[in-house]
């Protein structure tokens, strides 16, 4: 094993009385995000069952619930001590899952109603937007917002735009969207302020499945353009 | 089996929430007023995390097609069993064919109906809570509708008629009322990024519960809370009771159906023991806030857990006594 890497600058914060949060610099940076997931992986084996970890872009929350038969008034302190020890020890660089997941997307038209506007705003043709989006090295930083919604970093900077001025009341599930330096995939019909480039027929969240989410942090995502006919065919079959 | 004759505006099965899946973007859901939810369960001898029916503002009308032991806690919607008024906060025998209805709202926003044995729905991701927006868990992933039939897990014992109210020495189980007492706050991650004026306003002025409040969050209307300078934040974890402030300066308290992460600055969080009172507030109610400390919040939380366990022990013993235990 190689020498451990130092964690980025961190602060230990409380989020209410039943949650501790490790906050690294608030940024979308793969190096910081790898550290978040490395810390989560190091902490997880030692955590009791009443705890849950929530890794985000640049922070990690440890939530807990009271356990009737085992009360430890010093629990928050011992967790804090343990975190400081792990943070001081540094981490190995193998946090990413290493998976590459291919996501078919039907770009433009009713599937991606903002494609033309995005192209105009970026000074590109719609085909160039599709090519640049599909070629971007997307990586899953975190899941949040709605069940299974992946926050993807790695978008081609030529496509970076602020969020829409007025969010849509309802965005269809499967919509592939961009905002700032990120891409995301809507997993439920939900309100949303990102620009819609296309839609995938894949289900990103299946609550009854053994692993309900198609994607997980660390995955690399490759978007592959498909035609409307391809979308229909995939949607009709078992899309997953 | 319990038949839903009319559902009420929002009646859904909830337990203590779906834990362990926030990292997948799956919010915990669960009872808004966990205190009343747990009381309802302990009154009928259930595990505290059994599902109860969370009833919002107007009650449903339910027909029991089997005998049951039930308890109603939380908000007072003047429940009646076969037209007879029913006491809140105490177990009640129901015979087959009985009809439970609710009337005028006296206080609170949410009542909890527990049935001994618990509602028989399959847990999804370890919980019977209804994820209303995502549409899974609870009863078919949704609020109850007319004609639904809820199955009850078989209960182990049957009870003789119970005394009409708690024995002497048993504490009252009133609805946690938002009331005039301030809700206590801990400073949030971005507390220091807000202006002194904003900090003083939050702790000194009154805020009104906005009509756009729901199980996801309580939107408050009042003096705007401004940052010293704009903040560029990426999404961070949030918790039950987190007070976040979007650019319009009107605070939102995140509740049971909250998202797992959020990108708005967090000025504060409501301490855990005060969340049930907040969950019983309705649009138009006036709230005020005061500063607490982490030590106080943790001590109050621990004390509440101890109280609950004592009540659970006492109630279990009471339900197991001979006078209660005779079969019908």
Image: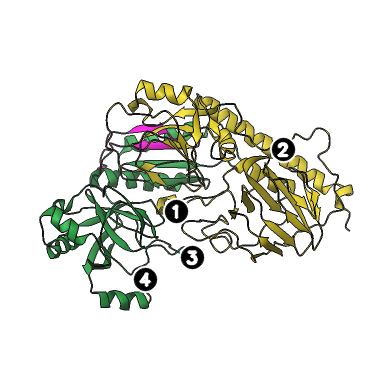
Chain colours: A green, B yellow
Badge number at residue A240: 4
Q: Main secondary structure of the magenta part?
A: loop
Q: Residues within 10 Å of mark 1 (few under 14, many from 20)?
A: many
Q: Is the C-beta separation of discs 4 and 2 under 8 Å?
A: no
Do marks 2 and 1 both belong to one polypeptide chain?
yes
Q: Is residue A146 above or below residue B293?
A: below
Residue occupied by mark 3: A208
Residue name at image x 27 percent, y 32 percent: B230
- Image: magenta residue range: A1-25
Q: Which residue is mark 1?
A: B26
Q: Are marks 3 and 1 in contact (CB under 8 Å)?
A: no
Mark 2–mark 3 distance (CA, rounded to whole Å): 37 Å
Alpha carbon separation for disc pair 3 and 4 = 13 Å
Q: CA distance from mark 4 to mark 1?
A: 19 Å
| Alpha carbon distance from label 3 to label 1 | 13 Å
Q: Earlier in the sequence, mark 2 or mark 1?
A: 1
Does residue B70 lie above or below B97 as drawn? above
Q: What number is the disc on residue B173? A: 2
Same chain shared by disc 2 and disc 3: no
Q: Residue sitting at 23 percent across and 44 percent down? A: A29
How crowded is the residue under tag 3: few (<14 C-alpha within 10 Å), some, or many (20+)?
A: few
Q: Residue at x 70, y 61 (%)?
A: B153
Please indicate whether residue B87 sits to the left or right of residue A141 in the image: right
- Could you tell me if residue B50 is visible in this image? no
């Amino acid at each position: 094993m190689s020498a451990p890497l130092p964690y980025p600058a961190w602060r230990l914060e409380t989020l209410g009385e039943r949650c501790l949060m490790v906050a690294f610099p608030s940024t979308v940076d793969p190096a910081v995000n790898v550290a978040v997931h490395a810390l989560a992986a190091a902490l997880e084996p030692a955590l009791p069952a009443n705890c849950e970890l929530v890794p985000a872009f640049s922070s990690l929350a440890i939530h807990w619930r009271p356990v009737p038969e085992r009360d430890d008034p010093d629990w928050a302190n011992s967790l804090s001590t343990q975190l400081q020890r792990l943070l001081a020890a540094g981490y190995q660089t193998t946090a990413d899952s290493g998976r590459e997941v291919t996501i078919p997307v039907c770009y433009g038209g009713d599937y991606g109603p903002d494609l033309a506007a995005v192209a105009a705003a970026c000074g590109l043709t719609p085909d160039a937007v599709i090519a640049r989006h599909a070629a971007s090295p997307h990586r899953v930083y975190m899941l949040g917002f709605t069940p299974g919604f992946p926050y993807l970093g790695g978008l081609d900077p030529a496509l970076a735009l602020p969020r829409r001025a007025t969010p849509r009341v309802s965005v269809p599930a499967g919509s592939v969207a961009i905002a700032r330096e990120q891409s995301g995939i809507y997993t439920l019909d939900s309100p949303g302020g990102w620009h819609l480039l296309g839609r995938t027929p894949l289900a990103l969240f299946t609550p009854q499945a053994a692993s309900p989410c198609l994607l997980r942090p660390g995955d690399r995502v490759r978007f592959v353009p498909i035609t409307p006919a391809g979308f229909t065919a995939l949607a009709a079959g078992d899309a997953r | 089996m319990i038949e839903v004759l009319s559902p009420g505006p929002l009646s859904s099965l909830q337990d203590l929430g779906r834990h362990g899946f926030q990292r997948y973007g799956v919010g915990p859901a669960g009872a808004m007023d966990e205190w009343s939810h747990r009381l309802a369960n302990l009154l009928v001898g259930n595990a505290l995390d059994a599902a109860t029916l969370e009833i919002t503002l107007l009650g449903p009308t339910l027909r029991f097609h089997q005998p049951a032991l039930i308890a109603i806690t939380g908000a007072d919607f003047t429940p009646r069993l076969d037209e007879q008024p029913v006491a809140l906060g105490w177990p009640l025998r129901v015979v087959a064919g009985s009809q439970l209805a609710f009337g005028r709202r006296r206080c609170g926003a949410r009542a909890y109906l527990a049935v001994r044995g618990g509602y028989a729905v399959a847990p999804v991701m370890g919980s019977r809570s209804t994820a209303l927006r995502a549409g899974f868990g609870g009863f078919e992933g949704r609020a109850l509708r007319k004609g639904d039939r809820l199955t009850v897990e078989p209960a182990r014992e049957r009870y003789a008629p119970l005394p009409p109210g708690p024995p002497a020495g048993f504490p009252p189980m009133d609805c946690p009322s938002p009331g005039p007492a301030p809700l206590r706050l801990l400073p949030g991650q971005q507390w220091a990024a807000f202006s002194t004026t904003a900090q003083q306003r939050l702790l000194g002025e009154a805020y009104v519960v906005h009509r756009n409040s729901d199980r996801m969050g309580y939107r408050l209307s009042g003096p705007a809370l401004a940052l010293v300078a704009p903040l560029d934040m990426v999404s961070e974890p949030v918790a039950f009771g987190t007070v976040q402030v979007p650019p319009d300066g009107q605070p939102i308290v995140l509740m049971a159906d909250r998202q797992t992460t959020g990108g708005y600055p967090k000025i504060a969080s409501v301490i855990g023991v005060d969340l049930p009172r907040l969950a019983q507030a309705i649009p138009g109610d006036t709230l005020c806030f005061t500063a607490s400390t982490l030590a106080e919040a943790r001590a109050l939380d621990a004390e509440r857990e101890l109280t609950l366990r004592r009540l659970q022990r006492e109630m279990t013993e009471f339900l197991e006594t001979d006078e209660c235990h005779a079969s019908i």
